[in-house]
Image: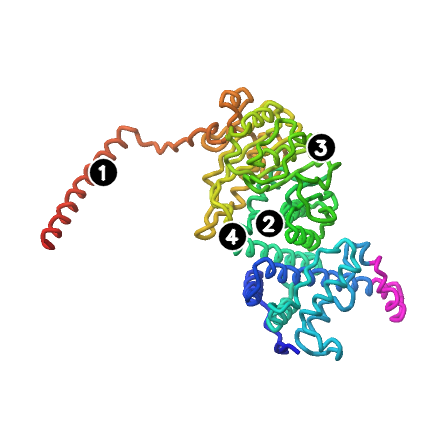
């Protein structure tokens, strides 16, 4: 029998930052001999199980209170409280008794157990809990990890982590509103925090499942996906959908206003996405399993109102068929899938639909393999609404500069024009390796676009006007004259220098004096160096 953890519960962290840091440090103890992907599955699986169990307990308490208020006695309540429809009908997963957090938390402490349960390791009980949840919730079939009882999982530390999650007091950490919603929102925030930390820890591999939140917010704030069908053909861990739901929530909408459709090639990432959607209360259709979007589109009939995507950059080995009907504007080259992703996304847009796609900067000007001609055809079809050049180092996983293409099936009064935004000077360094866009940066980009389109929004400027060095509205004729290059820097020009009121003659005179002073100092230092060399020789 594995050793048990202490019965003394750890003190709950007092702030959200402390909570995140404490959980990460505790989770990091499990790393041991695990590979990164298994370690990630263990932690995210536990957070997900905590979420669905908390949601179940909250709904159970609500049902009990409702029945008691209606005059039912305890025996009647005990009979009616296990009606699964009362849970699933409210978007709450049914959690069997052996998968409830209270049962697992007691086992982590090693108290209050039956002899049968006490003979099992905490890892085995968690595996059994995952099985039970998937069996009673068919939509989660094949989603949850069953890796907690393997030899390389330290059972003592697993118990410590579970105990810490139990004592974290999520419901006391949030903002105003119902405590149940507050707890679930915080668990969702913890899940996102772990995704970000895992992505940073895994480097390039992490970029395959995680798009930095500030980049996702650029897409969401410009497109405002508040209704209809939202689609992502390479959805990673589902960050685009989560930010869309947050946008709707911030603007007093309901998550049910959107229908989520996605596809993901990697099995583990597909599972992460399904858990991420569930933990944020989103019931998305990510297909019955993972799969290659080019080889087999799992949503062939979907015509989306909004598409948001961060496809893998410049992939050379992809399922290419020259006869594919998606290549309406030209067959993409075998050695680069960038324009395959773009054309697939265009093929999924409903009339009036819009899309935002993160791409490597080379996509804006490349002419290799016929890409220049494809780009010209897309521009002439008047599908490009806006091009945004982003600053470097937003992605910890790659040093490749990136941009965002925005497409629209109907550009309204801006037909025949494309807005170019050069945002390369924006952002701030969060550490030595990674940059992030601030709320003000995102608002400036989105507000410029909304003013240009004439969209009424909180961010929109009163009236659009070109800003040298930042924004320029170009006609299709101007783009054609530039050989269909879509690099914003080519159009926005240089920023205007602020006039400080000092006449140019005075500035030149001052600079001349400063330069002469520097010459004199340079000569003095050169003589000092010569003197030192003479003493040494």
Q: What is the spatial separation of the Cα atoms under label 2 and label 1, in whole angstroms?
A: 53 Å
Quarter of the image where one finds residue 338: top right
Give the quarter of the image for residue 341.
Answer: top right
Residue at x 71%, y 77% (from the top left corner)? 119
Q: What residue sits right under mark 4 in the picture?
A: 203
Circles 1 and 4: CB atoms closer than 8 Å: no
> Can residue 251 be seen here?
no
Marks 3 and 4 sit apart, C-alpha to C-alpha, by 36 Å
Q: Quadrant of the N terminus?
A: bottom right
Q: Distance between the residues labelled 3 and 1?
A: 63 Å
Residue shown at 49% from the left, 23% from the top: 482
Q: Is residue 5 magenta?
A: no
Q: Nearer the viewer, residue 80 or 459?
A: 80
The color scheme shown is rainbow
Lower sequence index among marks 1 and 4: 4
| Dot 2: element | loop
Q: How far apart are marks 3 and 2 (CA)?
A: 27 Å
The disc, 3 or 1, on the residue closer to the chain's N-terminal end is 3
Q: Circle 1 sits on which residue?
A: 514
The answer to which quarter of the image holds residue 493 is top left
Q: Give the range drawn in magenta.
A: 66-86
Q: On the rendered structure, is 375 left or right of 73?
A: left
Relative to the observer, which residue lies in front, 210 or 249? 210
| Magenta region includes residue 70 | yes
Q: Mark 3 points at which residue?
A: 350
Could you say whether the residue bearing mark 4 is in a helix, strand or loop? helix
Closer to the eye: label 2 or 1: 2
Label 3 Cα crowd, 10 Å radius (few <14 / some 14-19 / many 20+): some
| Residue with the mark numbered 2 | 209
Secondary element at tag 3: strand
Residue 363 is situated, as x and y percent measured from the top left of the image, at 53, 33
């Amino acid at each position: 029998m594995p050793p048990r953890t202490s019965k003394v519960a750890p003190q709950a962290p007092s702030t959200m930052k402390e909570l995140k840091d404490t959980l990460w440090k505790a989770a990091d103890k499990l790393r041991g001999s695990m590979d990164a992907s298994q370690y990630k599955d263990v932690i995210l699986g536990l957070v997900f199980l905590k979420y669905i169990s908390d949601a179940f307990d909250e709904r159970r308490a609500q049902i009990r209170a409702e029945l008691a208020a209606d005059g039912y006695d305890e025996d009647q309540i005990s009979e009616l409280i296990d009606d699964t429809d009362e849970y699933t009908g409210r978007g709450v997963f049914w959690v069997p008794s052996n998968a409830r957090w209270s049962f697992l938390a007691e086992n982590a402490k090693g108290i209050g157990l039956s002899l049968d349960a006490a003979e099992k390791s905490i890892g085995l009980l968690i595996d059994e809990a995952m099985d039970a949840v998937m069996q009673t919730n068919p939509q989660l079939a094949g989603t949850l990890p069953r890796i907690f009882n393997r030899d390389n999982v330290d059972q003592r530390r697993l118990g410590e982590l579970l105990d810490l999650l139990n004592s974290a007091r999520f419901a006391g950490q949030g903002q105003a509103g119902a405590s149940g919603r507050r707890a679930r929102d915080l668990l969702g925030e913890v899940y996102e925090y772990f995704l970000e930390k895992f992505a940073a820890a895994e480097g390039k591999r992490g970029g395959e499942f995680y798009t930095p939140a500030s980049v996702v917010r650029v897409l969401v704030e410009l497109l405002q996906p508040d209704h209809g069908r939202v689609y992502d053909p390479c959805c990673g861990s589902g960050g685009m959908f989560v930010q869309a739901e947050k946008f709707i929530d911030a603007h007093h909408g309901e998550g049910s206003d959107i229908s989520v459709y996605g596809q993901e090639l990697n099995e583990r990432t597909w599972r992460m996405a399904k858990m991420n959607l569930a933990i944020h209360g989103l019931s998305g259709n990510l297909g019955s399993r993972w799969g290659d979007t080019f080889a087999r589109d799992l949503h062939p009939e979907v015509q989306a109102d909004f598409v948001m995507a961060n496809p893998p950059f410049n992939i050379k080995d992809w399922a290419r068929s020259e006869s594919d009907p998606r290549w309406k504007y030209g067959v993409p080259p075998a050695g680069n899938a960038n324009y395959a992703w773009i054309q697939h996304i265009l093929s999924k847009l409903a009339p009036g639909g819009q899309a935002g796609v993160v791409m490597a900067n080379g996509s804006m000007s490349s002419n290799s393999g016929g890409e220049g001609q494809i780009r010209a055809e897309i521009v002439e079809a008047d599908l490009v609404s806006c091009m945004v050049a982003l600053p470097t180092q937003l992605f910890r996983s790659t040093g490749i500069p990136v941009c965002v293409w925005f497409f629209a099936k109907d550009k309204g009064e801006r037909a025949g024009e494309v807005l170019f935004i050069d945002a390369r000077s924006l952002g701030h360094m969060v550490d030595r390796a990674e940059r992030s866009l601030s709320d003000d940066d995102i608002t400036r980009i989105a507000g410029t676009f909304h003013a240009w389109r004439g969209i009424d929004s909180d961010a929109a400027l009163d009236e659009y006007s070109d800003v040298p060095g930042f924004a320029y509205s170009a006609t299709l004729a101007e783009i054609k004259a530039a050989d269909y290059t879509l690099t914003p820097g080519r159009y926005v020009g240089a920023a205007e220098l602020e006039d400080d009121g000092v006449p140019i003659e005075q500035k030149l005179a001052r600079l001349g004096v400063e330069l002469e002073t520097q010459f004199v100092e340079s000569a003095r230092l050169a003589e000092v160096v010569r003197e030192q060399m003479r003493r040494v020789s």
